[in-house]
Amino acid sequence: MKSRRLAPLALIAAVMVGTSGCAMLAPQATTIEYNPAEGAGATTGSVVVSNAVVVSEDGEDGNLIAAFTNESDEAQTVSIEFEGSSSTETLRIPAMSSISLGMDPDADSETAEGRVDGGEPILLEGIDTPPGATLPIYFQSGDAEGELIQVPVLDGSVEYLAPFVP
C-alpha cells in the first residue's frame, strides 16, 4: 500500500528533475561575453578597445572609429597597425579616462570613470578591403601583449556612419 502512495511522488520528482536539469547542463546565454554593436573589441594591457569599425566607401582608404578606455592610473600609448601597412598610428590616452574617435568634439561628457573626449577618426590609407569584409588590425598598449582583431569595414550607407566616409 505504501508503494502505491510513493509511486506518484517518485514520478513527479523524476519529471521535475528531468525538465529542469537542462539548465544545469547548458551554458547560460547571459554569461557569454559579446560585442552588442557592429564593431569589434580588444583588450591590451589596461586599455580596452570598444566598437572598432573602419568606414570606407570604396575599400581603398578608411576611417577608424573606436572607443579606447584606459583603466590604469597612468597614461597609456596605444599603437595601431593594420595588415599591409608599414606605418603605425599612435594614440595617447590619459589615466583613468576614455577617448572616442569619431565622436563629435562638441559632445564631450563627464562620466564616473573620467572625461570622454571626442576625437577625429584615424585615416587608414591603402586598406584594400571592401565594405562588408574585415580588416585585421593590431592594437598594443605599451609593453603589454597586443591583440590582432578582425575589424569590420562598413560603408556610409547607414546614416550615423555617413559623416565618417573619407
Image (tube, rainbow, N blue to C red):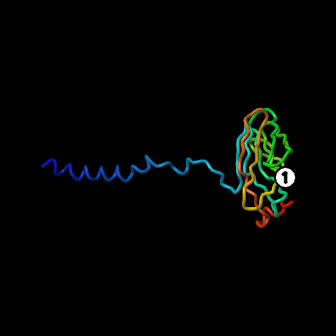
Image-based side of 9 in relation to 106, left or right: left
**Residue at x-position 76% and y-position 44%:** 138
Image-based side of 6 in relation to 165, left or right: left
State whether residue 118 is above or below residue 74: below
Residue 16 x %, y %: 34, 52
Residue 20 x %, y %: 39, 51
**Residue at x-position 77% and y-position 45%:** 68
Of 133 and 10, nearer the camera is 133
The C terminus lies in which quarter of the figure?
bottom right
**Residue at x-position 77% and y-position 67%:** 157
Q: Can you tell which quarter of the image residue 93 is in?
A: top right
Residue 144 x %, y %: 74, 34
Q: Secondary structure at mark 1?
A: strand
Residue linked to disc 1: 124
Q: How many marks?
A: 1
Of 140 and 21, nearer the camera is 140
The amino acid pointed to by label 1 is: Leu
Residue 149 x %, y %: 71, 47
> Callout 1 environment at 10 Å: few (<14), some (14 to 19), or many (20+)?
many
